[in-house]
Amino acid sequence: MLVLGLETSCDETSAALVRDGSEVLTNVVASQVDLHGAYGGVVPEIAARAHVEALIPVLSEALDGSPGPVDLVAVTAGPGLVGSLVVGVAGAKALAWAWEVPLVAVNHLEAHIFAPMCEGTLPEVPFLACVVSGGHTLLAEVRGVDDMEVLGRTLDDALGEAYDKVAKFLGLGYPGGPIIDEMSAGGDPRAVAFPRAMISSGDLNFSLSGLKTAVIRYVAKVKESGGSLPPTEDIVASFQAAALEVVVRKTVLATRERGLGSVVLGGGVACNRSLRRMMEEAGREEGLEVVFPSAVLCTDNAAMVAASGYLKHGAGFCAGLELEAEPSLTPGGCIPGEGRF
Ligand code: KG4
Ligand code: ZN
């Protein structure tokens, strides 16, 4: 089955052709990073307009050389920015109607969770999913394509958002995640003792906005006292160590609580080299299988949407032309215009 995936939930316009949910034939991603860089974050109105401009060229490139007609169209219906989501949803509806093929609506968070399918590394259910991106930080027990339970989430900023905000404050550029990842490699993670928020809270939730404030306060305090700041590499390495220690600790805690033997990491921050190293180390200690998709499948892309759509279609889900974008969709949440056959 040849599936066309479409992804426009935030600031990446992407289209992909995936065969049988696992063989990625094309995965075209047009990033808007240059457009939003000057603002230090995604500007929703600019993002929506850029999707309109990029959709047709990205689609044409993804479909170029298609081995045959598309059998199914899968599109991200939420969560995300409403003005961005509607561009992909409208495009997908038009294509499914014109080609007379079924349409399936995909939850962006579930797409991050099922991304390893594209590389044949998705573990057997049940497993623990840890989604860490610019908009989300959550832990979920995944028991099936339509059966997952959120165990914990951030109560304020998402992990990627914290990276981006700290980088913006330090004047390092946008997006902050990859920059801090790179700089931290040459820094001392023990240079500054930033707080590990909620590390012993006993639940599986996170709080990251306090850590960002702690970095800002620390810099202000050192400057006020006339002292000299450690190298920026040390500050970002220390920030990163504090943030990631909590994520890894709570991921392990969740697997223990639920008796799960494997962990799937997804979302843009899952590209992070320290997180990968720390999670693999924890996995070895705990006897856990730890799965990371390759970087292009961690950040927003349509191949993961096609794979997730293929699974949903197999489970009997379908969407009609009344499908609507659902900006605040949660894993396992209801999508307007979706049903089962
Ligand atoms: O999954 P994604 O592409 O979009 C959302 O669904 O949010 O994630 C983007 C986020 C940004 O906050 C970016 O700074 C972060 O992922 N990110 C990273 C790295 N690469 C991207 N954070 C830490 N280390 C990285 N290497
Ligand atoms: Zn994402």
Image (cartoon, rainbow, N blue to C red):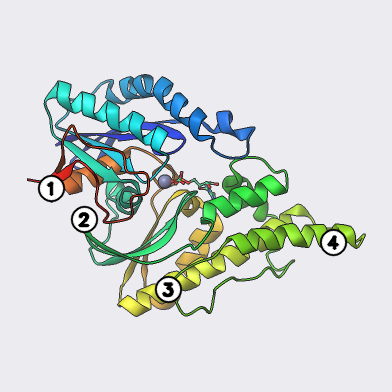
**Local secondary structure at mark 4:** helix
Mark with earlier residue (4, 1): 4
Q: Amino acid at mark 4?
A: Val
Mark with earlier residue (2, 3): 2
Q: Which mark is residue 222?
A: 4
Q: Are marks 4 and 3 in contact (CB under 8 Å)?
A: no
Mark with earlier residue (1, 2): 2
User: Distance of mark 4 from mark 3, alpha carbons?
Assistant: 35 Å
Identify residue for label 1. 314
**Local secondary structure at mark 1:** helix
Residue 15 appears in the picture as rendered: no
Q: Are marks 1 and 2 in contact (CB under 8 Å)?
A: yes
> Foreground mark, 2 or 3?
2
Query: Residue 135: percent from the left, percent from the top?
Result: 47, 49
Q: Amino acid at mark 3?
A: Val
User: Distance of mark 4 from mark 1, alpha carbons?
Assistant: 58 Å
Identify residue for label 3. 252
**Local secondary structure at mark 3:** helix
Identify residue for label 2. 145
Q: Looking at the image, which residue is at 90% across and 63% down? A: 225
Q: Looking at the image, which residue is at 60% across and 48% down? A: 164
